[in-house]
Image: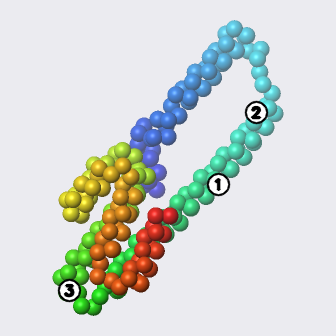
Amino acid sequence: MWRFAWHLQHWRHSTVLKRIAAPLCALVLYALAARWVNEHVLAGRLALPASALSLQGASIGLLLVFRTNASYARWVESRVAWGRIVSHCRNVMRQSALWMNADVETAAKKKALRRVRGAAWAFSRCLANRLSGPEDETPLRVELETRLESAAAARLLRAPNRPLQALADLASVMNALPIDEKRRVEMDKSVILLGD
């Protein structure tokens, strides 16, 4: 319920409204002009039968239902895709934690896992930024500079395709892990699935 109230308060900042404002204003002006001409010039002689409006209303209603269903299907598809991304990132972290060689010191293991975790997070965050608007640039910059090493954050911020750069960084970090080759290939499959 609170989301509905928030949208009612902030409708002036709607990106959809900004995109359709010009055609909407043109249609409103056209309708007002048609009504003024009908009342003042034609003296009310121009009238449409009610059946034409009823048929038009029914067809517009069906069109809206189909558009709503298509929109909902796209939303469900995007949720499934995002769920796959989260699952593959978890898989990369699980593999990194479990498959690291046993002779690695605890401090080195924690540092390596922190780098993998940061790279996996950076991929999902950069992908979310690519799907967001320009208002997400400042929060992204702050989060990257806070969570990652300065060189990695700077590389991501200047990259033309940030999710792809983050994926390359993740592959590079994983390649540096002390893991045998067979397991490294399995982990690389998870990174490939993230890129698909």
In front: 50, or 187? 187
Q: Position of residue 138 (x, y in %)?
A: 28, 49
Instruction: Tell me the mark number nearer the camera, choosing from 3 and 1.
Output: 3
Q: Which comes before the other along the chain, label 2 or label 3?
A: 2
Residue 7: image location, x then y, percent: 44, 47
Mark 2, other Cα within 10 Å: few <14 / some 14–19 / many ≥20: few
Residue 25 x/y as whole percent: 54, 26
Amino acid, disc 2: Leu
Residue 118 visible somewhere in the drawing: yes
Vertical position of residue 64 compared to residue 117: above or below: above
Mark 1 Cα-neighbour bin, 10 Å: few <14, some 14–19, many ≥20:
few
For the residues labelled 3 and 1, the Cα–Cα distance comes to 52 Å
The quadrant holding residue 127 is bottom left
Q: Is residue 90 visible?
A: no
At numbered mark 1, what does the secondary structure look like: helix, strand or loop?
helix
Disc 3 and disc 1 in contact, CB within 8 angstroms: no
Q: Name the amino acid, label 1.
A: Asn
Q: What is the CA distance from the residue labelled 2 to the residue labelled 3?
A: 75 Å
Tell which tag, 2 or 3, sits nearer the viewer.
Answer: 3
Q: Which residue is mark 2?
A: 53
Of labels 2 and 1, earlier in sequence is 2
Q: Residue furthest top?
A: 41
Residue 173 vs 5, above or below: the answer is below
Camera-side residue of 10 and 158 = 158
Q: How is the image coloured?
A: rainbow
Q: Secondary structure at mark 3?
A: helix
Q: Residue at x 30, y 56 (%)?
A: 156
Q: Quadrant of residue 134?
A: top left
Mark sitting on residue 106: 3
Q: Nearer the viewer, residue 81 or 50?
A: 81
> Is disc 3 surrounded by few (<14), some (14 to 19) or many (20+) residues within 10 Å?
few
Task: Identify the residue under disc 1.
Answer: 69
